[in-house]
Image: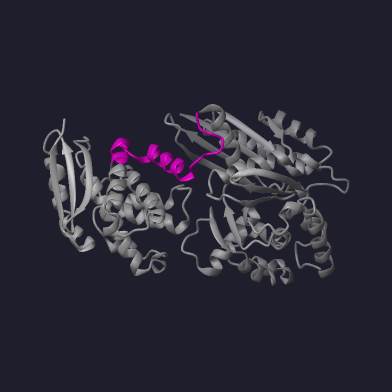
C-alpha cells in the first residue's frame, strides 16, 4: 500500500488530497484539505506577489507538509498555477515556500495545466466531444476535445478573482465596469477561435462551475448533491444569470447553494461561463468534480503502474476499482456477472430490456452485488446499493447509478421499501420499476448459479422452447444447492416473464 499526496496551489485556493494505492492498484481518497489563499488578490499594482502572499503560501505548505507526515504520505506532488506563474516574483515565492516546507513546489505552464485538467475529466466523465474549461482564480484553461482526444487548448489570463479585483465587482457591480469586464472576456475568447459555434457540451472544472452546479441543484430540488457529471441545460443557467449582476454581496450570500467564500467572485466567474456558452452555442453544461489534481494522479498511476494514461473504458475501470476495494470474493462476482449477461442475451424476448441501456447496468450491479458484505453481511443487499449510490462509479449518469444500486439492492428479491424516502423515487416511472424487477431477477438467478461460490456449474445455456424458458446446465456433479436456489426463483420468474422455467442438468467432464 502506498499514499500519494497531491497539492495544487491555485490562484483562489490551495488544496491537498492524499490518495491511497492498494496492492491491487485500487485507489481511494483518504484526506482532503482546502486553504482559501486568494493569491490573485495578494498582488501589488505591478503584479508582484506581496509579502502577505509569501507568508500565506509558506504557512499553507507547512501545514500541508504536517498533514502529509501525519497521514504517512510516501510521495508528494505539488504544483502552482496562474497566480504564481504570472507574477514576476512567482519563482521566488515558490522557492521560498519550498525551502520552508520541504515540499518541492513546481510552477506549471498554462498548457500543462490544461492538459492535466483534460486528463482529470476524460478519465472520469464519459464524453466524446466537448469543450472543457478549468476556471480558476487568475486563469481559465479552455480545451477542445474530439473523439476523447485533446485537439487544442489555450490558457486565458482571466479568472474569477483577478476579474473581480480589476473591475471591483466584489459587492454590487457597476454597470459600466461590468460591460468593460464582458468586453475584456470576449477579447480573450478570440484566442480560441475553434470555440465559435462548435455546439459542443461545456464541461466545467473548478469552484465556479461547482458553485453554479450547486445553485442549479438547489433551484430544481435535484435528487442528489453529487456534483461530478451533473448535467443541465445551459438555458437554465442563462435565465438565472440575468439577475445575478444586479445583486449585492449580501444578497448573493443568501443564494441557496452558493457558499460565502464564492459570493464575492461569482459574478466574474459566471460571466466567463456565460461568454463561453454564448460563443460556443452549447446547449448543455456538465459539472466535473475532477480536474487538475485527478489529472496529476492519473499521470502518476500511468508512470508507476500498468494503468493507461487515458482509460479506454471509464465504467469498467471504475467498477474494477470498487471490486478491488469492497468485494470479498472477486471471482464469484465476475462469475455472477458472466451468468447474468448470458441470461440477459438468451432471454431477450422475455424480459424485453434494451441492451444498450440495461446490459451495462446489469453487469455493473452483478460485479458489485456483494460489496455490501464489507459493511455487514446482514442486509448486505441494501449496503451494496448504498455503496453503489455513493461510490465513485464513473461512466454512468446519476440516474443510471441509482438504477444500478436498485438492482444490487434487489438481488435477493424486489423490496420497494428500499425506495422509501429516497429523493429519486418520483423520477422512476412504473414501467421502469417493472424493468428493474426483470433485471434484478436475472441477477438473482445468476447468483443462484454460483451460490456455493465453487463454480460447480461448467456452462449454462438459456433458451426459449415451446413458449417456456429452458435453462440447461452442464456440471460434473449434481449442483444440488444451486438447483435448490433456482427452485426458489420459479414464482418470481413466472410472474415477471409470463412463462415457466425448466432447468435441465447435463453431465459434464
Q: Residue furthest front?
A: 466
User: Which quadrant of the view contains residue 480?
Assistant: top left
> Residue visible at 38% across and 40% down?
323
Of residues 211 and 140, the one nearer the viewer is 140
Q: How far from the left and from the top, in percent, is residue 440?
A: 29, 55
Q: Nearer the viewer, residue 202 or 139?
A: 202
Q: Position of residue 295 (x, y in %)?
A: 60, 40
139 vs 498: above or below: above
Q: How is the image coloured?
A: one colour
Quarter of image, res 199: bottom right
Q: Is 238 situated left or right of 427 in this image?
A: right
- Residue 254 location in percent, x, y? 62, 68
Residue 22 picture location, percent across and down: 44, 32
> Residue 473 colored magenta?
no
Is 311 magenta? The answer is: yes
Nearest the eye: 509 or 24: 509
The answer to whether residue 379 shows anywhere in this view is no
Q: In which quadrant will I find the C terminus?
A: top left
- Left or right? Give the position of 173 relative to 312: right
Question: Which residue lies at the image location 72% right of the left edge and 28% below the top edge?
Answer: 99
Q: Main secondary structure of the magenta part?
A: helix
User: Which residue range is magenta in the image?
Assistant: 306-335
Would residue 483 be visible to someone looking at this image? yes
Left or right for 132, reference 24:
right
Closest to the observer, 438 or 387: 438
Identified at 56% across, 38% down, the residue is 310
Q: Quadrant of the N terminus?
A: top left
Amino acid at each position: 500500500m502506498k499514499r500519494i499526496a497531491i497539492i495544487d496551489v491555485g490562484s483562489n485556493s490551495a488544496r491537498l488530497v492524499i490518495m491511497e494505492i492498494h496492492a491491487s492498484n485500487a485507489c481511494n481518497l483518504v484526506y482532503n484539505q482546502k486553504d482559501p489563499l486568494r493569491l490573485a488578490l495578494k498582488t501589488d499594482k505591478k503584479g508582484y506577489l506581496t509579502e502577505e502572499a509569501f507568508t500565506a503560501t509558506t504557512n499553507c505548505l507547512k501545514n500541508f507538509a504536517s498533514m502529509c507526515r501525519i497521514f504517512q504520505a510516501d510521495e508528494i506532488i505539488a504544483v502552482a498555477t496562474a497566480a504564481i506563474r504570472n507574477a514576476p516574483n512567482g519563482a521566488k515565492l515558490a522557492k521560498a515556500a519550498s525551502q520552508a516546507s520541504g515540499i518541492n513546489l513546481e510552477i506549471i505552464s498554462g498548457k500543462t495545466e490544461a492538459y492535466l485538467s483534460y486528463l482529470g475529466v476524460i478519465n472520469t466523465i464519459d464524453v466524446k466531444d466537448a469543450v472543457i474549461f478549468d476556471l480558476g482564480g487568475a486563469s481559465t484553461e479552455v480545451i477542445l476535445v474530439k473523439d476523447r482526444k485533446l485537439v487544442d487548448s489555450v490558457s486565458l489570463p482571466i479568472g474569477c478573482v483577478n476579474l473581480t479585483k480589476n473591475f471591483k465587482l466584489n459587492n454590487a457591480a457597476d454597470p459600466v465596469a461590468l460591460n468593460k469586464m464582458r468586453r475584456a472576456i470576449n477579447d480573450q475568447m478570440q484566442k480560441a477561435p475553434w470555440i465559435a459555434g462548435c455546439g459542443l457540451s461545456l464541461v466545467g472544472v473548478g469552484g465556479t462551475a461547482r458553485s453554479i452546479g450547486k445553485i442549479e441543484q438547489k433551484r430544481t430540488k435535484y435528487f442528489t448533491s453529487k456534483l461530478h457529471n451533473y448535467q443541465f441545460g445551459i438555458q437554465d443557467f442563462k435565465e438565472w444569470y440575468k439577475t445575478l449582476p444586479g445583486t449585492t454581496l449580501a444578497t448573493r450570500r443568501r443564494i441557496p447553494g452558493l457558499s460565502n467564500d464564492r459570493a464575492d467572485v461569482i459574478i466574474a466567474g459566471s460571466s466567463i461561463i456565460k461568454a463561453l456558452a454564448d460563443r460556443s452555442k452549447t446547449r448543455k453544461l456538465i459539472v466535473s468534480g475532477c480536474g487538475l489534481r485527478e489529472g496529476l494522479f492519473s499521470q502518476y498511476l500511468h508512470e508507476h503502474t500498468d494503468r493507461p494514461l487515458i482509460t479506454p473504458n471509464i465504467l469498467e475501470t471504475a467498477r474494477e476499482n470498487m471490486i478491488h476495494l469492497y468485494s470479498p470474493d472477486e471471482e464469484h462476482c465476475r462469475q455472477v456477472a458472466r451468468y447474468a449477461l448470458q441470461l440477459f442475451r438468451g432471454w431477450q424476448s422475455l424480459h424485453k430490456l434494451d441492451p444498450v441501456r440495461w446490459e451495462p447496468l446489469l453487469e455493473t450491479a452483478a460485479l458489485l452485488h456483494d460489496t455490501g458484505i464489507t459493511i455487514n453481511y446482514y442486509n448486505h443487499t441494501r449496503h451494496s446499493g448504498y455503496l453503489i449510490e455513493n461510490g465513485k462509479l464513473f461512466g454512468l449518469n446519476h440516474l443510471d447509478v441509482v438504477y444500478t444500486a436498485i438492482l444490487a439492492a434487489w438481488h435477493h428479491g424486489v423490496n420497494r421499501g428500499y425506495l422509501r424516502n429516497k429523493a429519486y423515487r418520483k423520477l422512476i416511472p412504473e414501467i421502469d420499476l417493472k424493468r428493474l424487477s426483470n433485471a434484478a431477477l436475472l441477477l438473482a438467478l445468476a447468483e443462484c448459479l454460483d451460490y456455493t461460490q465453487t463454480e460447480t456449474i461448467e456452462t449454462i445455456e438459456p433458451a426459449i422452447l415451446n413458449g417456456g424458458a429452458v435453462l440447461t446446465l452442464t456440471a460434473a456433479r449434481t449442483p444440488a444447492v444451486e438447483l435448490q436456489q433456482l427452485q426458489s426463483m420459479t414464482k418470481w420468474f413466472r410472474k415477471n416473464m409470463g412463462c415457466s422455467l425448466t432447468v435441465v442438468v447435463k453431465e459434464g467432464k
